[in-house]
């Protein structure tokens, strides 16, 4: 009979709560109190929830270690959940990128296009930030692959403090330029609820500050 101690891991609970909050908030803001028709739930609205879930999970993944370094006592379940949170967050980012690519057109995101169909300067900055952040996160995810663990120089660089801070900075850039125009007009917020991009930005910004202070 195997009597080895069971490793505590809170990843499942954290992912479930994050998804319930993110998807529930998206449905509430866009459909229940907002004007978006229910036919857009499968792609447009759920994509918003997936994006918010991804940013929350990645922030938690990057921040639990630095929080511990700063003297906060975190349970073993939280610390052991980091890998699963990071991988799930990355998968959500991948899904978000694929869906966004399919629906990113003037009819859906008119504020990001000129009349001739080209991207605005703000849209270019947002897309640049998103693409660079995705590539960096993809590289970080590769560091967990078995066949790359023997490359100590690669692992040391890809998991270094500066590399992760750069990845988070580009993510903040993507969120900021994607939504800051809407943040400045609370009177136009659907149902008076803050935009999802603003919630993600604030959450991610706190995580960035925690990593600056606590990541070694």
Image (spheres, grey):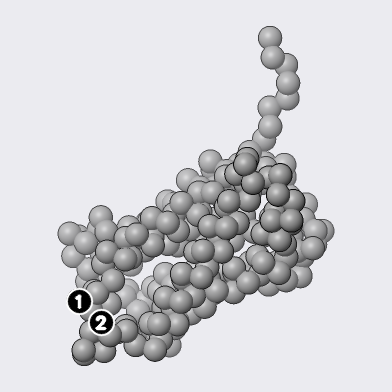
**Where, quadrant-wise, is the N terminus in this rendering?**
top right
Q: Secondary structure at mark 2?
A: helix
Do we see residue 99 in this rendering? yes
Density class for disc 1 (Cα within 10 Å; few <14, some 14-19, many ≥20) is few
Q: Which residue is depicted at the point 31% across and 75% down? A: 190
Q: Is residue 122 above or below residue 9?
A: below
Q: Which residue is depicted at the point 34% across and 59% down? A: 98
Q: Residue furthest top?
A: 1
Which is more toward the observer, 181 or 126? 126
Density class for disc 2 (Cα within 10 Å; few <14, some 14-19, many ≥20) is few
Q: CA distance from mark 1 to mark 2?
A: 6 Å
- Residue 38 is left or right of residue 205, and the answer is left
- Residue 11 is left or right of residue 214, and the answer is left
Which is more toward the observer, 200 or 103? 103
Which is more toward the observer, 12 or 136? 136
- Residue 68 is left or right of residue 107, and the answer is right
Q: Which residue is depicted at the point 38% across and 60% down? A: 96
Q: Are marks 1 and 2 in contact (CB under 8 Å)?
A: yes
Where does the image place residue 145, in percent across and percent down from the top left?
A: 60, 44
Residue of label 2: 110
Residue 107: which disc?
1
Where does the image place residue 90, in percent across and percent down from the top left?
A: 50, 54
Q: Secondary structure at mark 1?
A: loop
């Amino acid at each position: 009979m195997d009597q080895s101690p069971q490793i505590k891991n809170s990843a499942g609970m954290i992912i479930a709560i994050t998804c319930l909050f993110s998807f529930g908030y998206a449905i509430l803001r866009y459909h229940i109190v907002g004007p978006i028709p229910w036919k857009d739930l499968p792609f447009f609205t759920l994509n918003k929830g997936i994006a918010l879930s991804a940013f929350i999970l990645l922030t938690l993944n990057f921040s639990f270690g630095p929080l511990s370094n700063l003297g906060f006592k975190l349970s073993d379940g939280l610390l052991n959940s980091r890998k699963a949170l990071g991988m799930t967050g990355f998968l959500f980012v991948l899904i978000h990128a694929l869906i966004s690519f399919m629906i990113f057109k003037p009819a859906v995101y008119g504020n990001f296009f000129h009349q001739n169909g080209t991207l605005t300067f703000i849209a270019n900055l947002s897309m640049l930030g998103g693409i660079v952040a995705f590539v960096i996160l993809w590289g970080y995810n590769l560091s967990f692959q078995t066949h790359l663990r023997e490359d100590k120089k690669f692992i040391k660089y890809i998991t270094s403090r500066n590399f992760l801070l750069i990845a988070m900075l580009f993510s903040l850039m993507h969120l900021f330029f994607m939504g800051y125009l809407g943040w400045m007009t609370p009177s136009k917020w659907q149902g008076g609820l803050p935009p999802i991009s603003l919630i993600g930005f604030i959450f991610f910004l706190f995580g960035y500050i925690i990593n600056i202070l606590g990541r070694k």
